[in-house]
Image (cartoon, rainbow, N blue to C red):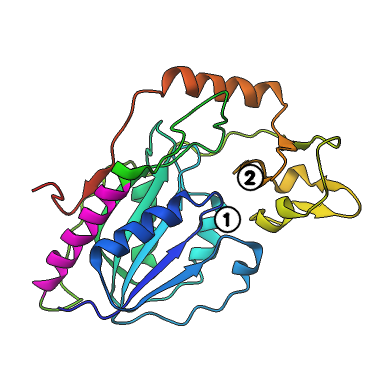
Amino acid sequence: MKIKQVKLIYFSPTGTTRKVLESIAEGIAAADVEQINLTLPQGVQKTVPPFSDELVIIGAPVYGGRLPADAIKRFKQLKAGKTLAILIVVYGNREFEDALLELKDLAIELGFNPVAGAAFIGEHSFATKDVPIANGRPDSLDVQKAMAFGTKIKDKIKVLQSPDALMDLQIPGRFPYEGGVRSLAVAPVTKEDTCTVCGTCADVCPTAAISMNGSVATQVELCIRCCACIKNCPTGARVMEDSKWKNIANWLNENCSTRKEPQIFGIDVYK
């Protein structure tokens, strides 16, 4: 089979998942690549036409070893008819646990035929300059591995006779899924002395938890602690102050600092 079109579908609040998917697509080297960004709230109402003979790469971050609930909600709009799919999760150098298996099961439920999957590493959402947790990842080495993965995907699909071919993709994980986001009724706060009320934080919030009315207001119950607002604030006015949150970040910094590498399933990318 020849790959005529590649579609990247992702939920990527801080851009790490998007970067990995773009690198994989670069390795595939298809002439026609389209991005379907389901990160922002308008993605809930976005109408995505059914998929057929294109190759779809679906990606999401890992929160507490699972897929984000908002990503699942938006992915459930997708409909496919045995469309070939590559499944990607991106985690912050701790563990991806059941997230990739969860994405595989969801993809099959939506009508996709998973060809391969991978777990890549991205800068943890809780990471800061002072408390690094996989800062700067995916880095150049990750990008190279993602591109190599894309090249091997192209080679695997080239020899397929039909998109209906049974892949039997083996993904680690457990069902019922375990883990999930910790219940913390906290959200980033705004340092008013450095805030310029530019609205960037509201623009990048995937759940519309932030509103602007002369100052920044955050609905704590809507916050998923993706930290897009912190990482995108041009003046550094959005910060984490909750002590439990800081303790988690410090624990991750102390216990998850040894570099982990991407894990590939369905393809031996390094041969």
Q: Is residue 150 magenta?
A: yes
Q: Does residue 20 appear anywhere in the picture?
A: yes
Tell me, for residue 252, which label it has, or none. none
Percent across and percent down for residue 120 are 34, 44
Residue at 71% from the left image edge and 50% from the top image edge: 201
| SS under mark 1 | helix
Badge 1 crowding class, 10 Å Cα cut-off, few under 14, some 14 to 19, many 20 or more, is: some
Q: Earlier in the sequence, mark 1 or mark 2?
A: 1
Reply above or below: 96 against 14.
Answer: above
Residue that mark 2 sits on: 224
Which residues are the magenta region?
A: 143-160
Which amino acid type corresponds to the residue marked 1 in the rendered image?
A: Asp
Residue farthest along the top direction in this orientation: 254
Asked whether disc 1 touches disc 2, contact meaning CB atoms under 8 Å apart, the reply is yes
Query: Image quadrant of residue 237?
Result: top right
Q: Magenta stretch mostly in which secondary structure? A: helix
| SS under mark 2 | loop
- The residue nearer to you, when weighing 184 against 240, is 240
Compared across the picture, whether 158 is left or right of 13 comes to: left
Compared across the picture, whether 140 is left or right of 183 comes to: left
- The residue nearer to you, when weighing 211 against 237, is 237
Badge 2 crowding class, 10 Å Cα cut-off, few under 14, some 14 to 19, many 20 or more, is: many
Residue that mark 1 sits on: 70
Residue at 42% from the left image edge and 54% from the top image edge: 19
Percent across and percent down for residue 215 are 88, 48
**Quadrant including the N terminus:** bottom left
